[in-house]
Image (spheres, rainbow, N blue to C red):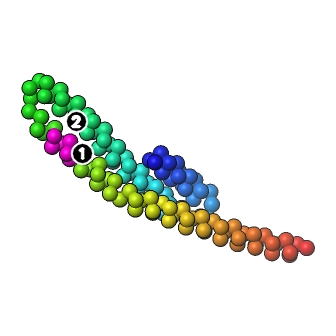
Amino acid sequence: MRKSAKKLRYAAEAVGAATSLKTKRLYNACKQMQSSLGDFQDAVTSRDRLVHMADAARRRGEDTFGYGLLYQRERTIGLKSLEEYSEEVKAIRSAYERLTKNAKEQAKKKNRKDRKEEKKQK
């Protein structure tokens, strides 16, 4: 999902640069989702690393309580990063639908303008 959000964000950026369509809302919604999913992935990776570090410390006879605290902190960070996921999906969908609607309206206006120009030339 994170890669898809990234691709859509880059597409929105390109469309915004190449046309008069306002793509900032879609761009920002995708960027927010990418950030949240990145935070989640970082927390997953950190937890995995902490498990290995705690296991090694345990085998050396060291206290591993601190690793458990850090693990729980990373778990909390990961869960918090996913709390807004469904809202982020809605924001992307809403921004995309709005952009699509605006693109269709612009196309209709251009078609009307082109037809008027054709009539003038006849």
Q: Earlier in the sequence, mark 2 or mark 1?
A: 2
Residue 115 shows up from this direction: yes
Quarter of the figure that contains the C terminus: bottom right
Amino acid tagged 1: Glu
Which residue is disc 2 drawn over?
50
Question: Please, what is the dominant secondary structure of the magenta stretch?
Answer: helix
Which residue is disc 1 drawn over?
74
Q: Quadrant of residue 110?
A: bottom right
Q: Which residues are magenta?
A: 68-74
Measured in 3D between alpha carbons, the distance from the residue under mark 2 to the one under mark 1, in whole angstroms, is 9 Å
**Does the magenta run of residues contain 62?**
no
Which residue is painted at 29% across and 51% down in the image? 79
- At label 1, counting other C-alpha atoms closer than 10 Å, the crowd grade (few under 14, some 14-19, many 20 or more) is many
Q: Does dot 2 land on a helix, a strand or a loop?
A: helix
Residue 5: image location, x then y, percent: 48, 51
Q: Does dot 1 land on a helix, a strand or a loop?
A: helix
Which residue is painted at 29% across and 49% down in the image? 78
- At label 2, counting other C-alpha atoms closer than 10 Å, the crowd grade (few under 14, some 14-19, many 20 or more) is some
